[in-house]
Image: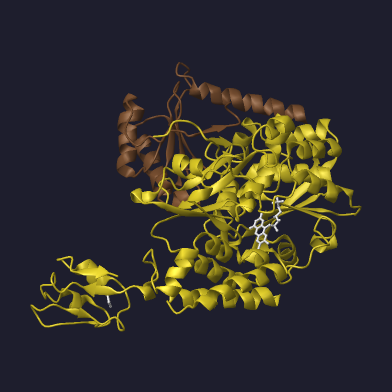
Chain colours: A yellow, B brown
């Protein structure tokens, strides 16, 4: 077992340590001390300066400097402002925000109150998907307990500052994680994005200045205030400070929730912390940034993870999903999987995203069926770029990334599908055939009896034959054959 | 419940809670007690953490072992769920993974009752800001 500690827990500092349903345990670990100190001993400008100097950037995907966002919201004059926590977390395979909310809900409440103090807002809203019932339950308990102690409500810490938090439920649409769509959804309108500017910091919820931050971004705030900007900015790389939480999933041994300093390499994450690839298989690629991101390969394993390096390598940080793929994964199918997701989740407001992604999906489908041509490949790349350049919101602007990055890194796999009609990793069912080795087959008829579509014929004690056109590639025959006579080509 | 009306209120409250906790952890103190945390985030519950928690509560009760058993959030070892953390008085916390009822019984009989380690320990592979 690897002994050295590659992980530092800042956002996850209390997850797995405290009982999330007991505010006392949060208080023992210095909970609400940052809020108390900010309200009692600091001006809002001083707090914002600490956040700015810490170098914290948004963990929801964009990486926008958090202190600057707070300052922008503060500077707008308005009677009412809002603090919003984005807990939509729509990336397939991602569960960072859910874990924070389930394990340490008070940290988010505390940070939102600090934000309210800085921006001049007295109302906080957490937009959370209804598919997170446990997180919702624990947040409700946390809000009740904080109100009981007077840590939310009127006159907090005896300082005249008032702040309260309410929950808003999303129906689990990916696009509602985009901040303008999220705000419209909270207003009771369709969850569709609108063009920025105006940014939410100028005109957001109900037309009022609104500060939207991600769950993990908030989870960093109390620690930064307690330990100082210098401490935080000493961790990480030049332009990406602190740590990042990743949901490590896919073909690694140690699937789990990890938090590493910015600047850690992918190799350390996958092989040291993740314990390497399952079943001793070979690493092929890792997808970061979910459906908006790209895949990174063997060649990228030693780059250090930060916002800028990942973009320079053709992917992005995203919110922290990290899916590892091995030699058995087909990269064309992977791109198709994400496009399938995007087509489902596109809100349909703009045509490049609504129609373009559907066409991209169809092309990928044709290729995985072995019916693609070289011309399709150039059309695919072309259209991907058009969708990227012309879509209204971040969803369509990034959805072609999985296609483009797999084409950049694994063009040979696309070529194999198109030119040779072969799927090198043997995943595309349409491109493989189950074949009976006539020399090994003893004619026991087991395979013919188990085949659900009667695609196997042959006399007893004679070699059998699979009709490839009728075969649905279910593999039942191969599982059943006691003589190892059936193989895939 | 008392309201926190100022920063010094909060500090006082933390100190009181802290000293109560410290007593539990000290072996020679009469209030010392075995502390068990069960990782009960969505991932843990899906792997059966609730059953383990109920089982341990019952088993500890039957054996008249004084222990506090609480739920906590995700410890990060999703691959090894259900995971539990056991702290014996005067000892460092130890995390066990892949805990089923058989393992839970072994942990109680061997580790908690005799102090001898059993298989299934997950080495802690991170630092936290609180315990530097
Ligand atoms: C399609 C799409 C989905 C998004 N989903 C999320 C999400 O689930 N959670 C999130 O925090 N941000 C999401 N974002 C980013 C938000 O628009 C916004 O930038 C973020 O909440 C700002 O918070 P931060 O600065 O703390 O990262 C998404 C953006 C797009 C374009
Ligand atoms: S139909 Fe061919 S393997 Fe089952």
Figure disc tally = 0
Locate residue A85, reporting x and y percent: 70, 52
Locate residue A58, reporting x and y percent: 70, 48
Q: Image check: A217 left or right of B103?
A: right
Q: Which residue is situated farthest in the left direction here?
A: A461
Q: Is residue A189 above or below residue A322?
A: below
Q: Is residue A92 above or below residue A163?
A: below
Q: Residue at x 44, y 42 (%)?
A: A271
- Quarter holding the C terminus of chain A is bottom left
Q: Image check: A149 left or right of A342?
A: right
Whether residue A228 is visible: no
Q: Which residue is situated farthest in the right direction here?
A: A77
**Of residues B127 and A426, the one drawn nearer to the viewer in this rendering:** A426
**Of residues A399 and A176, the one drawn nearer to the viewer in this rendering:** A399
- Quarter holding the N terminus of chain A is top left
Rendered-image quarter of ligand 1: bottom right
Locate residue B111, reporting x and y percent: 34, 29
**Of residues A420 and A282, the one drawn nearer to the viewer in this rendering:** A420
- When asked about the image quadrant of residue A289, the answer is bottom right
Whether residue B25 is visible: yes
Q: Image check: B58 left or right of A319?
A: left
Q: Residue at x 70, y 25 (%)?
A: B12
Q: Residue at x 45, y 50 (%)?
A: B45
Q: Which residue is situated farthest in the top direction here?
A: B28
**Of residues A147 and A446, the one drawn nearer to the viewer in this rendering:** A446
């Amino acid at each position: 077992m690897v002994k050295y500690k590659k992980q530092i827990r800042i956002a996850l500092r209390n997850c797995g340590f405290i009982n999330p349903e007991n505010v006392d345990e949060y208080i023992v670990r210095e909970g609400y001390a940052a809020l108390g100190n900010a309200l009692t001993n600091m001006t809002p400008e001083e707090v914002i300066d600490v956040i700015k100097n810490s170098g914290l950037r948004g963990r929801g995907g964009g990486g926008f400097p958090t202190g600057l966002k707070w300052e922008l919201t503060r500077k707008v004059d308005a009677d009412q402002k809002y603090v919003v926590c984005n807990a939509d977390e729509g990336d397939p395979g991602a569960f960072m925000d859910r874990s924070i909310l389930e394990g340490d809900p008070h940290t988010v409440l505390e940070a939102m109150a600090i934000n309210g103090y800085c921006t001049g807002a007295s109302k906080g809203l957490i937009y959370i998907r209804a598919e997170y019932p446990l997180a919702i339950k624990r947040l409700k308990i946390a809000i009740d307990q904080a109100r009981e102690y007077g840590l939310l409500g009127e006159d907090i810490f005896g300082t005249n500052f008032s702040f309260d938090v309410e929950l808003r439920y999303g129906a689990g649409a990916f696009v509602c994680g985009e901040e303008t769509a999220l705000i419209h959804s909270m207003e009771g309108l369709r969850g569709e994005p609108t063009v920025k500017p105006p940014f939410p910091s100028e005109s957001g919820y109900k037309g009022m200045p609104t500060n939207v931050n991600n769950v993990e971004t908030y989870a960093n705030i109390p620690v930064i205030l307690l330990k100082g900007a210098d401490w935080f900015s000493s961790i990480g790389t030049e332009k990406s400070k602190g740590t990042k939480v990743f949901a490590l999933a896919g073909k690694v041994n140690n699937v789990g929730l990890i938090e590493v300093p910015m600047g850690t390499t992918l190799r350390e994450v996958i092989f040291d912390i993740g314990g390497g690839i399952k079943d001793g298989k070979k690493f092929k690629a890792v997808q970061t940034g979910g459906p908006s991101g790209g895949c990174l390969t063997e060649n990228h394993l030693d780059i250090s993870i930060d916002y800028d390096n990942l973009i320079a390598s053709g992917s992005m940080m995203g919110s922290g999903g990290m899916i590892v793929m091995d030699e058995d994964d087909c990269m064309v199918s992977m791109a198709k999987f994400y496009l399938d997701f995007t087509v489902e989740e596109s809100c349909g407001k703009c045509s490049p995203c609504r129609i373009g992604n559907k066409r991209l999906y169809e092309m990928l489908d044709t290729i995985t069926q072995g019916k693609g041509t070289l011309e399709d490949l150039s059309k695919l790349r072309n259209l991907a770029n058009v969708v990227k350049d012309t879509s209204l919101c971040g969803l369509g602007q990034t959805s072609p990334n999985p296609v483009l990055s797999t084409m950049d890194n694994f063009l040979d796999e696309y070529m194999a599908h198109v030119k040779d009609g072969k799927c090198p990793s043997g995943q595309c069912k349409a491109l493989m055939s189950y074949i009976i080795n006539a020399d090994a087959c003893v004619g026991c008829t087991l395979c013919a009896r188990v085949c659900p579509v009667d695609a196997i014929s042959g006399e007893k004690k004679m070699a059998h034959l699979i009709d490839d056109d009728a075969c649905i590639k279910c593999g039942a025959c191969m599982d059943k054959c006691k003589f190892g006579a059936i193989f895939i080509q | 419940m008392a309201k926190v009306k100022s920063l010094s209120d909060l500090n006082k409250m933390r100190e009181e809670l802290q000293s109560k906790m410290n007593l539990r952890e000290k072996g020679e103190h009469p209030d010392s007690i075995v502390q068990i945390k069960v990782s009960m985030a969505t991932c843990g519950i899906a792997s059966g953490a609730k059953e383990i928690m109920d089982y341990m509560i019952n088993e500890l009760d039957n054996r008249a072992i004084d222990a506090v058993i609480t739920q906590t959030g995700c410890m990060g070892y999703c691959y090894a769920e259900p995971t539990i953390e056991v702290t014996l008085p005067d000892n460092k916390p130890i995390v066990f993974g892949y805990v089923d009822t058989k393992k839970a019984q072994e942990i109680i009989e061997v580790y908690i009752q005799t102090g001898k380690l059993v298989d299934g320990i997950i080495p802690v592979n991170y630092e936290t800001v609180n315990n530097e």
